[in-house]
Image (cartoon, rainbow, N blue to C red):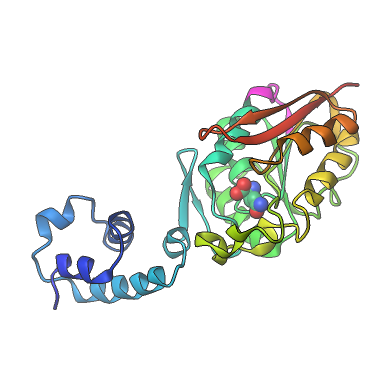
Amino acid sequence: MPTYQELARDSGLDRPDIHALFHHLGGYNRAFLITHGDEAADPAFAERFTALAARRRAGEPVAYLLGEKEFYSLTFQVGPGVLIPRPETELLVDLALERLPQGGALVDLGTGSGIIALTIAHERPDATVTALDVSAAALEIARANASRLAPQVRVLQSDWYSALGHEQFAVIVSNPPYIEQDDPHLQQGDLRFEPRSALTDEADGLVHIRSIINGARPRLLAGGWLLFEHGFDQGLAARDLLEAAGFDQVQTWQDIAGMDRVSGGLALA
Ligand code: GLN
């Protein structure tokens, strides 16, 4: 039986991936390879580690191998049916939290694993939060996350606004599929394994953003905000669309990397 150190070295993985798999499979912390590295590995551990390491070498995202990803200090279940949470999406959560009035209603369009809706509901138990997605696979994961993190959230199947009645919201948020169909990033890294329909509109990247903007006004209360994430080069287009739809205080915010990442506007009465 190889030692833990040999298992790690022979895996060909980089240190962060090795630590993530060691922690996931054995509960071992980062010091384990230093303190126990020269011990013979537990056979069951070795078998499971070797299998996951092979999948990782073939490119599968770590988050899918672990079945979870951290976002806004909460742990979310994830799988191949949903986009992997990205740290830049925390900006959208912060902007929504700042604008959501006490007891206000918020809807998250295309909730995926539920990170936006559930984080906001977790932070703000006073709010009435609705999470929508068209994908049955996503809804299953969003519901599992909701039951653990924010069971008060209503999770519904909906093609953008289609399942909503006449209710109105103080805040509408979305991180829609905004990548252009021929963007080479779709063929790289984790994105190769994520649902294509969560990443791209199979067009110019603005199709879903247009749908969301054009349907927003009647669903917003006076003084309500529409806020959505977009690509680093879509800020100007997003603001133009918001202005054309009659939004006030139209603006774009930058993420931690200094990139245009979220745009939004206020609906006057
Ligand atoms: N709202 C989810 C997230 O931000 C899913 C987004 C998506 O699938 N485009 O991760």
Q: Is residue 91 above or below residue 200?
A: above
Q: Is residue 225 or residue 187 the one in the foreground? A: 187
User: Where, by quadrant of the figure, is residue 222 drawn?
Assistant: top right
**Residue 126 seen anywhere in this rendered image of the structure:** no
Q: Is residue 222 or residue 130 the one in the foreground? A: 222
User: What is the x, y in percent for residue 79?
Assistant: 54, 62
**Residue 119 seen anywhere in this rendered image of the structure:** yes
Residue 109 part of the magenta-drawn span: no
Q: Main secondary structure of the magenta part?
A: loop
Marks counted in the figure total: 0
Q: Residue at x 56, y 51 (%)?
A: 145
User: Where, by quadrant of the figure, is residue 119 drawn?
Assistant: top right
The magenta segment is: 98-105
Residue 101 part of the magenta-drawn span: yes
Q: Is residue 92 above or below residue 10?
A: above
User: What is the x, y in percent for residue 180?
Assistant: 71, 55
User: What is the x, y in percent for residue 169?
Assistant: 80, 32
Q: Is residue 201 above or below residue 228?
A: below
Q: Residue at x 45, y 68 (%)?
A: 59
User: Where, by quadrant of the figure, is residue 116 drawn?
Assistant: top right
User: What is the x, y in percent for residue 225?
Assistant: 77, 28
Indicate left or right for 135 with 2 as reference: right
Q: Is residue 63 or residue 125 the one in the foreground? A: 63
Which quadrant: the C terminus? top right
Indicate left or right for 31 with 248 as reference: left
Which quadrant: the N terminus? bottom left
Q: Residue at x 55, y 40 (%)?
A: 88
